[in-house]
Amino acid sequence: MVTIDGSHGEGGGQVLRTSLTMSALLGRELRLEHIRAGRSRPGLAAQHLASVHAAAQICGAEVRGATMGSQELTFTPGEVRAGRFHFEIGTAGATTLVLQTVLAPLLFARGSALVQIHGGTNVRWSPPQEYITNVFLPAIARMGAEASLDCMVPGFYPRGGGCIEARITPLERALRPMAWAERGEMRSLTAHSVVEARLPGHIIRRQIEGARRELGSTGLRAHTAHPRSKSSGTMLMITAEFEHGMAGFTSLGERGKPAELVGAEAGREAAAFLQSDASVDRHLADQLLIYAALAAGETRYVTEEITDHLRTNAWVIRQFIDAEIEIDETTREVAVRGVGLPAR
């Protein structure tokens, strides 16, 4: 059994999700203690329980302690299985975080999987579905992972009500490492401006204009969407693709916040990144770590910032496997020698 102190490092929901991912993937029994102990509302909330139930469903796990507010959990996994899965968060909790909990194990299943998740698709403190589609999935695709994501209905805070659908193809061989120590030439820079259908269409343009003012003449392309949802909301995300790197920068709209400011926030983050030598943004640096640890060989990339999320994720992964993970606090380079987990 692997015992994880849920209060370690960043001490949030990521410790839980990474632990569930590794437990389901490797078939190792897990005990989590002190879950989110330092938070204002410690223990499991609805979104965390959704990840627990999703992980349990894909591997037929026996779970004890999966209740609201619980700070202790025991997870005894079976074999990961392929098939169709449907998960309900029940709130505007992030569908993308639930997907990331089950994605890695399902890549190592014995067949394809179709995963449908209902909840929030564009909410705070989590990657929007556009980030998963345009940054995260293309990044792991370069390692050999084949998965796609469709947003059936967007879900903004506070009502959620969104739905994403992911199709996951099992690996035929171990994941490939990535040599992203130098990002090379930029291939594309795109602003994704999303405004719910009940809001004025001019917000789409104003968000893009705010981003362009921060970025200057960088050849920014625009992709727009005006979908209908149960809750009104807006988002501007900028994605950058390089020869050897990916990055995304997001700002969400809110009542009283000018559309130009929404675009400007993402634009400033993107502009700072483009001036750096980083090959991945700070969120992708964290999200890639599991896949690099499982790959056959050494992965290297440079992040814009070494975060507590990254350090904590590295610690959790090391509790399960003997991957060598080095994080250089000065150069911001992450080097991972993976274990080369074979496909099933």
Image: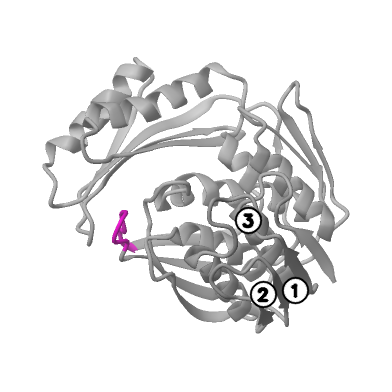
The residue drawn where x is 62% and y is 70% is 106
Q: Which residues are magenta?
A: 152-160
Looking at the image, tell me whether mark 1 or mark 2 is earlier in sequence order. Answer: 2
Task: Tell me the quarter of the picture where residue 217 sits.
Answer: top left
Residue 69 position within the rendered picture, expressed as x and y whole percent measured from the top left: 56, 67
**Few, some or many C-alpha atoms within 10 Å of disc 2 (few <14, some 14-19, many ≥20)?**
many
Which is nearer the eye, 261 or 220? 261
Give the left or right position of residue 64, taking residue 252 as reference: right
The residue drawn where x is 60% and y is 75% is 66
Is any part of residue 344 visible from this angle?
yes
In whole angstroms, how far apart are the C-alphas of marks 2 and 3? 30 Å
Tag 2 secondary structure = loop
The disc placed on residue 36 is 3
Q: Amino acid at mark 1?
A: Arg
In whole angstroms, how far apart are the C-alphas of marks 1 and 2? 7 Å
Asked whether 154 falls inside the magenta stretch, the response is yes
Residue pointed to by mark 2: 109
In whole angstroms, how far apart are the C-alphas of marks 1 and 3? 34 Å
Give the left or right position of residue 103, taking residue 2 as reference: left
Classify 40 as above or below 109: above
Residue pointed to by mark 1: 344
